[in-house]
Amino acid sequence: MTDRTTFVSLEGLRSRGWTDGMVRDLLGWPDVQGRDPRRGAGAPVRLYLLARVEAVERAREFGGCARAGGTAGVRVAAERRRRAVLATLRAEPIRVPILPPAELERRAVRYRREVGGAGADDGAAGDLARWQVGYLRSALRSYDALLDGLFATSGRVEAERLLRQRVDAAIAQAYPWLAGECRRRTEGGRGR
């Protein structure tokens, strides 16, 4: 059973000054969704972690949304936040770990085995380049934290694409022999 003291229902959010548009744009999907045992087969109960709700309420965007009267203010604040995150992504230097080629190969093969790559020992040169870029991308996952400033889905796809492009470009610059694989991934839109 879920401890309801650490969660807030949609009705509870409304009593705190949230509109449905603000919930959708700032919180996104509920943390827990289920049926209310007191209402039987009624509408599902959506619950949001209180800590997450309070963190959003402390953000400047929430105050602006509440003052602006809900959805219109949410859109303006979300757009402002999207622009700020994209600017941060463009300015943040991407530091790729520099390894000797043999060490990079060894780590890439080990990484491929760990993520479940069958036949990791008998790959062709193209497979090895793919594994090396995959390993380096995984080593650079700390940059994903730059996306945390985006609430729900506002601009997230665009920001993720920009981050992938920047990471691929940094890998290609640090390891020129992997530039073709980085370009292939960037043009193909492949995720990590």
Image: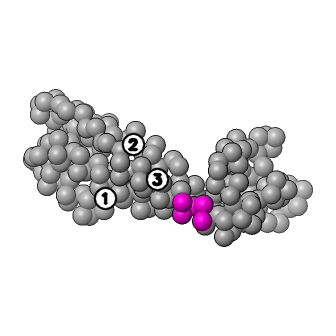
Q: Secondary structure at mark 2?
A: helix
Residue annotated with mark 3: 85
Q: Which residue is mark 1?
A: 190
Colouring used for the render: one colour
Please name the amino acid that badge 3 sits on.
Answer: Val
Q: Helix, strand or loop at disc 3?
A: helix
Residue 1 in which image quadrant: top right
In whole angstroms, how far apart are the C-alphas of marks 2 and 3? 12 Å
Type of amino acid at the residue the image marks with label 2: Tyr
Magenta-highlighted residues: 76-80
Near mark 1 (Cα within 10 A), the count class, few <14, some 14-19 or many ≥20, is few
Q: Is residue 100 magenta?
A: no
Closer to the N terminus: mark 1 or mark 3? 3
Residue at image position (44%, 61%) is: 157
Reply yes or no: does residue 79 show up in magenta.
Answer: yes
| Residue 153 in view of the camera | no
Left or right relative to 42: residue 141: left
> Where residue 176 appears, x then y in whole percent?
11, 46
Which dot, 1 or 3, sits closer to the camera?
Answer: 3
Q: Secondary structure at mark 1?
A: loop
* Nearer-N-terminus badge (2/1): 2
Q: What is the x, y in percent for residue 24? A: 66, 63
Q: Residue at x 14, y 55 (%)?
A: 180
